[in-house]
Image (spheres, rainbow, N blue to C red):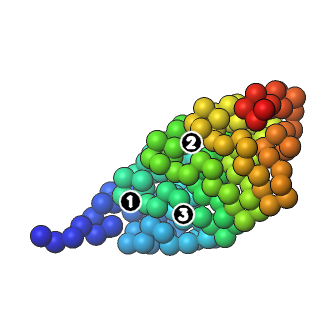
Amino acid sequence: MSQVSVRDRIDPILENWLQVRGFDANNLEQPGENGDTALMQATREGELETARSLIRAGALLNARNNDGNNALWFACFRDRYDLIELLVEAGINCDNQNDNGATALMYASSAGKTEMVRALLAMNADAKLKNLDDFQAIDFAANFNIIKILKNVTV
């Protein structure tokens, strides 16, 4: 029985998307700009169906770019609950710490993304993690609502 190649798991629409963005359909982990993989790029662009197709094709969920961020960081940046849900359900590490020790929850907290903070906590993000400077997400809270939310989970 022959082994199925990555290209055999990719539909023509996804193959075209990859090609247009300079990615190789035979290597879904190929790093692009700043070490971003195709899944990170799809998430950064808010492309839910493309991200879903990449996951089905076997894209590595927990790949990290040159800054140590995974695709979840970009879903938070874009305020895309649907992408966060897709990634978490597929098994992404929602507590990935980048090169500075920051998590997506810390980012959302610092950016004042109250609903994103709620969504990440609902998906079991760990609010007690500390970055390299020994700060938690609550220490970055950009507004009072985020402080209230995080205070309830870190006390």
Residue type at mark 3?
Ala
Decide which of tag 1 and tag 2 comes sooner along the chain: 1
- Return the residue found at the far front: 155
Quarter that holds the N terminus? bottom left
Q: Position of residue 22 (x, y in %)?
A: 52, 71
- Dot 1, how many residues are within 10 Å of its Cα: few (below 14), some (14-19), or many (20+)? few
The amino acid type of the residue labelled 1 equals Gly
Camera-side residue: 110 or 17? Answer: 110
Q: Mark on residue 84?
A: 2
Q: Which mark is residue 63?
A: 3
Q: Residue 33 occupies which quadrant of the picture?
A: bottom right
Q: What residue sits 70% from the left and 51% below the top?
A: 103
Identify the disc placed on residue 58: 1
Secondary structure of the residue carrying tag 3 is: loop
Amino acid under label 2?
Ile
Q: Return the mark for residue 94.
A: none
Residue 44 at least partly seen: no
Mark 2 neighbour class, 10 Å CA radius: few under 14, some 14 to 19, many 20 or more: many
Q: Are marks 1 and 2 in contact (CB under 8 Å)?
A: no
- 66 sits to left or right of 132: left
Give the distance between the C-alpha atoms of the residues marked 3 and 1, in whole angstroms.
12 Å
Mark 3: few/some/many CA within 10 Å (<14, 14-19, 20+): some
Front position in the image: 82 or 64: 64
Gap between marks 1 and 2, in whole Å?
18 Å
